């Protein structure tokens, strides 16, 4: 990092925090602190929802994912618009009219206290685990750039986030998100343009896209069905619909965003904007990863992008031959890529086919050489199934982007982390206070008492997130890890809400047992099944609903302790 | 922290296409078009 990068980074971060705190003046009641007094306009909610969802992991890990596996990860977002429509049509009006602080509060009105509490605890477990991962991702950034230990960087990041979240509540979070999203979009455009500018003179944009496609990096849609395949059109359209239904319908970090809307229409518009904008945005981020891949066709990338592991295996006797093998593979691929571009320019169809085969074979040799080097990490006592996916984009940014742009990209990653993390911490605090503390520990406190409890809870969850941040290191690709962790819990929550809105006869006890059965089924699939995580949500939801229905019809006395309760619209 | 909130929750029509169902239909058509374009993109550059 050079002086200009530091200036860009510090100015961006200070302006985000200052602006968020400035807009959060007057958050002096619980309603204003947790729900912004239900006054937010749709565009602020829309950008806040996108920013909360787009954590630093999105930029660090998604670009790396695209580099090694192509763009097919975009399919994981195909279910999002479907989920947004369902949430807008059914949940938004029901939640708004119920005048609730948390989604789980609604479950007590529909079922009973134990169902609400179980759902709250499931949320706290799931989101609490994710909160650590969210803060860990940018710690990688600072650790690479500054050479600081990851523990120090997670503490620094956590302190900044906790400060403005504790002081300003949801308003500070939302307005900071708006500004963060603007910086994120600007930073992404600058990063893509810079990658393309850095390509060799004889390789135009069309050639770059062609080379990425020829190496299988533009595989945005794959139609082969396989239960174990994480990303294909089927798991995207069906599996991820359940994931996003769970996320936007049952996860307080998102529900709280649209509960701040000043009307039902404003909340719907915020969600539907997300439905329209998310897939193109994700495509854009993945495309940057594909272009970084093309860049490294002509500039030799390190054999491992994680410098610490590379330094550790370099003294090994087996490293030198592996490195030589890798160097040869790279040179062969570079020559093949240039020859392919030449054949393309010459419009020589037969030559192009020949060069295409040579290029793909060279890519396979390159992949094999990298796998061989990565294998040294494990054989020399390093982590099992070593993956440096999360380091690819960062390594590129810090080595090759010009002065100022590096600072901007780093600011993007920080902005994304702060938005995602603040949203998580804020929602964890809300559920802790509203669904646990006020429900079981201190029922009749003053507004000021609960306001202070919310601030303390926010501080607690901030410290917790920092403490668990190191856990992310063990999980390989972080973007996938976050979704896997979410999927372990979301299915049961979704099943509970499906029962609440779709099956009026089902009572609290049947739902409670159904949720426990759903969790058992999901963990069974996770531990023993060979099923992609995108299907966990569907499995969990189906098991919850089927179990609760079976109990209701086999033991009719369990049904309707709740028959007289007000029903959602 | 009030247990009951008596404020009205307005449910306005959408700013365009007149009904929410039409908006939802438009979003789903948009999804189908996006998937189709991405499929074409994959095939074109494979």
Image: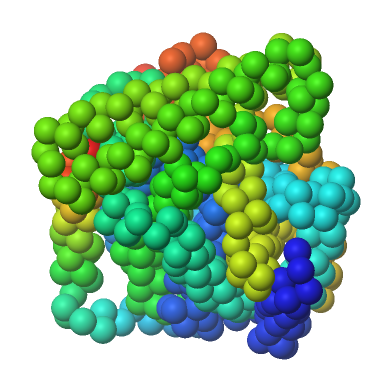
Q: Is residue A336 visible?
A: yes
> How far across and how far down the image is residue A53, in percent?
52, 57
Vertical placement of A495 versus A540: above or below?
below
Q: How was the colour assigned to the protein in this rendering?
A: rainbow
- Would you say residue A253 is visible in this rendering? no
Q: Is residue A27 above or below residue A134?
A: below
The location of residue A131, given as percent across then percent down, is: 69, 48
Q: Vertical placement of A302 versus A417: above or below? A: above
Q: Position of residue B25 (x, y in %)?
A: 17, 62
The answer to which of A63 and A439 lies nearer the viewer is A63
Q: Quadrant of the N terminus of chain A?
A: bottom right
Q: Residue at x 26, y 84 (%)?
A: B15
Examine the rendered structure and indicate whether residue A220 appears above or below residue A451.
above
Quadrant the C terminus of chain A occupies: bottom left
- Residue A459 appears left or right of A338: right
Q: With A319 as the anchor, is A197 left or right in this view?
A: left
Residue at image point 61% right, 22% down? A324
Residue plotted at (55% across, 54% down)? A59
Query: A473 or A304, which is in the foreground?
Result: A304
Residue A527 lies left or right of residue B33; in this view the side is right
Q: Nearer the viewer, residue A399 or A504?
A: A399
Tell me where residue A357 sits by quadrant: top left
Counting the numbered discs, the total is: 0
| Residue A226 falls in image quadrant | top left
Residue A296, position as x, y percentages in the image: 49, 44
Q: Residue at x 39, y 26 (%)?
A: A362
């Amino acid at each position: 990092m050079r002086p200009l990068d530091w200036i860009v980074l510090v100015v961006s971060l200070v302006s985000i925090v200052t602006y968020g705190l400035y807009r959060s003046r007057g958050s002096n009641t619980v309603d204003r602190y947790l729900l912004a007094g239900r006054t937010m306009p749709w565009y602020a909610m829309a950008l806040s929802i996108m920013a909360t969802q787009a954590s630093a992991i999105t930029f660090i890990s998604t670009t790396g994912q695209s580099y090694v596996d192509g763009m097919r990860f975009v399919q994981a977002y195909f279910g999002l618009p479907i989920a947004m429509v369902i949430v807008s049509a059914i949940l938004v009006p029901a939640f708004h009219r119920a005048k609730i602080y948390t989604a789980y509060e609604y479950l007590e009105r529909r079922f009973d206290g134990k169902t609400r509490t179980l759902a709250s605890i499931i949320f706290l477990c799931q989101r609490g685990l994710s909160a650590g991962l969210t803060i860990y991702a940018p710690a990688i950034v600072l650790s690479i750039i500054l050479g600081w230990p990851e523990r120090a960087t997670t503490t620094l990041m956590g302190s900044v986030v906790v400060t403005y979240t504790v002081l300003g509540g949801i308003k500070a979070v939302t307005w900071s998100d708006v500004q963060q999203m603007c910086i994120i979009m600007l930073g992404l455009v600058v990063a893509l343009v810079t990658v393309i500018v850095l390509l060799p003179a004889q390789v135009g944009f069309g050639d770059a896209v062609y080379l990425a496609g020829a190496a299988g990096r533009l595989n945005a849609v794959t139609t082969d069905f396989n239960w174990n395949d994480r990303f294909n059109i089927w798991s995207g359209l069906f599996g991820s619909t359940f994931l996003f239904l769970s996320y936007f319908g049952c996860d307080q970090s998102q529900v709280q965003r649209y509960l701040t809307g000043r009307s039902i229409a404003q909340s719907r518009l915020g969600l539907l904007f997300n439905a329209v904008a998310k897939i193109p945005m994700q495509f854009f981020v993945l495309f940057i990863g594909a272009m970084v891949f093309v860049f490294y066709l002509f500039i030799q990338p390190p054999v491992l992008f994680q410098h610490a592991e590379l330094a550790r295996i370099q003294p090994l006797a087996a490293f030198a031959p592996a490195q030589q093998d890798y160097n040869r593979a790279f040179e062969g691929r570079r020559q093949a890529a240039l020859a392919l571009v030449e054949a393309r320019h010459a419009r020589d169809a037969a030559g192009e086919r020949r060069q295409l085969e040579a290029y793909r074979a060279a890519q396979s040799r390159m992949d094999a050489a990298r796998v061989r080097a990565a294998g040294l990490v494990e054989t020399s006592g390093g982590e099992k199934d070593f993956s440096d996916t999360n380091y690819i984009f960062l390594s590129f940014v810090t080595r090759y982007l010009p002065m100022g742009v590096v600072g901007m990209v780093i600011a993007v990653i920080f902005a994304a982390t702060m938005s995602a993390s603040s949203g998580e911490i804020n929602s964890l605090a809300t559920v802790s206070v509203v669904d646990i503390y006020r429900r079981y520990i201190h029922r009749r406190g003053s507004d000021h008492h609960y306001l202070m409890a919310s601030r303390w809870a926010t501080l607690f969850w901030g410290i917790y997130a920092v403490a668990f941040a190191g856990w992310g290191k063990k999980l390989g690709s972080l973007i996938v890890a976050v979704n896997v962790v979410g999927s372990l819990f979301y299915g049961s929550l979704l099943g509970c809400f499906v029962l609440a809105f779709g099956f009026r006869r089902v009572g609290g006890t049947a739902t409670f047992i159904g949720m426990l059965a759903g969790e058992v089924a999901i963990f069974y699939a996770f531990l023993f099944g060979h099923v992609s995580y995108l299907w966990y949500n569907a499995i969990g939801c189906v098991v919850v609903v089927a179990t609760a229905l079976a109990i209701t019809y086999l033991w009719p006395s369990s049904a309707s302790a709740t028959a007289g309760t007000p029903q959602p619209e | 922290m009030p247990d009951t909130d008596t404020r009205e929750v307005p449910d306005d029509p959408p700013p365009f296409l007149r009904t929410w169902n039409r908006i939802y239909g438009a979003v789903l058509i948009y999804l189908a078009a996006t998937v189709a374009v991405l499929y074409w993109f994959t095939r074109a550059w494979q």
